[in-house]
Amino acid sequence: MARRTKGRAIDGILLLNKPQGISSNKALQQAKGIYFAQKAGHTGALDPLATGMLPICFGEATKFTQFLLDTDKTYVVRAQLGERTTTSDSDGEIVETRPVNVTLEQLEQEIASFLGESDQYPSMYSALKYQGQPLYKYAREGIEVPRKCRKINVYRITLDEYDEQTQQIQMTVHVSKGTYIRTIVDDLGEKLGCGAHVIMLHRSEVGHYPSDKMITLVELEALLEKAKAEEIAPSTYLDELLLPMDTALVDLSVVDISAEQGVAFGHGQTVTVENLPDGIVKVVADGKFVGIGERNPQGLLKAKRALSSAQPESQ
């Protein structure tokens, strides 16, 4: 007996503007429900405190989430100087209060010191796992566990605002994958000798995706109501918001093959391609995106992630 799958088979990427106060998974489930999608996944969790860009991959786009997880991100962060918390943000308890005696010149100098490549130890309140459990679960029980430092790269970090009255600062930070902004702020507070924690965090960009393409859950709900009032299918408004799934792969080289080769590629067969580059490539058959592939030891193109859907992508 065939298994019935609940929801629509839709493919594409939605740039959700996650609201404050809910987890990334809850935001994902709400978006999935609004779209009545069979399958969905997000690409890099934001803390409940944080807002901003959370790309939601529907259907076959979930095959390419790793490329968005691995890309760089840009954040706008506001921090409170003079207080250090258990979680390095305002969701935690204040554990230390110190006077703030910093000049604008000192602040700019210490902020600039984060530029470039460095080692960073993940926060105990991160979602990284140790022995199958996320670190934050250990942290809530007061258990400290070993964490491996990771190489991060801060491509750009600027001081946008310094309010001497409230001792709050606002920065824009462009970083490599896996960088914890809370840890940068906590480390900055220690460099300044006064302590600091995050009070606002907004992810404005993921890779090449611009912030003006984001949409909120409230706006999605409004489109649902509009479609209901007009007695038309919600997909009329919702699906046009989806970006083609291969927009997650803009940094890959493109290999063009024929429609016939595309069928073979989709069935897992190797394909002969002249001047096939090394590494993972985006494969297009007769103008249509069909998946990603790589060169095998014999120099032939083999599928790494091939699309199973024969339907055209949302535009």
Image (spheres, grey):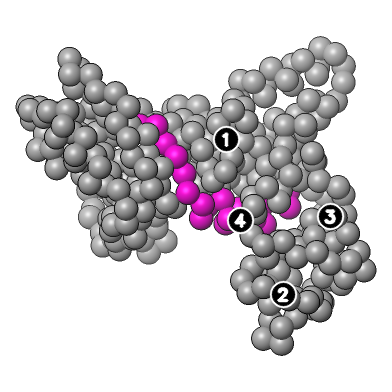
Residue 163 pos. (x, y %): 23, 19
Q: CA distance from mark 3 to mark 1?
A: 24 Å
In-image side of 205 versus 159 (left or right): right
At x 79% / y 39%, what residue is drawn? Answer: 315
Q: Label 2 amino acid?
A: Leu
Asked if the residue at tag 2 contacts the one at tag 1, i.e. Cβ–Cβ closer than 8 Å, the answer is no
Q: Label 4 amino acid?
A: Asp
SS class of the residue under badge 3?
strand
Q: Which residue is mark 1?
A: 210
At x 17% / y 15%, what residue is drawn? Answer: 165
Q: Nearer the viewer, residue 153 or 92?
A: 153
The circle drawn on residue 118 is none
Mark positioned earlier in the residue sequence (3 or 1): 1
The circle drawn on residue 276 is 2
Q: Nearer the viewer, mark 1 or mark 2?
A: 2
Mark positioned earlier in the residue sequence (2 or 3): 2
Mark positioned earlier in the residue sequence (2 or 4): 4
Give, as a single range, the part of the protein colored magenta: 59-78
The circle drawn on residue 288 is 3
Question: Label 4 crowding class (10 Å Cα cut-off): few <14, some 14-19, many 20+?
Answer: few
Mark positioned earlier in the residue sequence (4 or 3): 4
Q: Label 1 amino acid?
A: Pro
Q: Which residue is mark 4?
A: 251
Asked if the residue at tag 3 contacts the one at tag 4, i.e. Cβ–Cβ closer than 8 Å, the answer is no
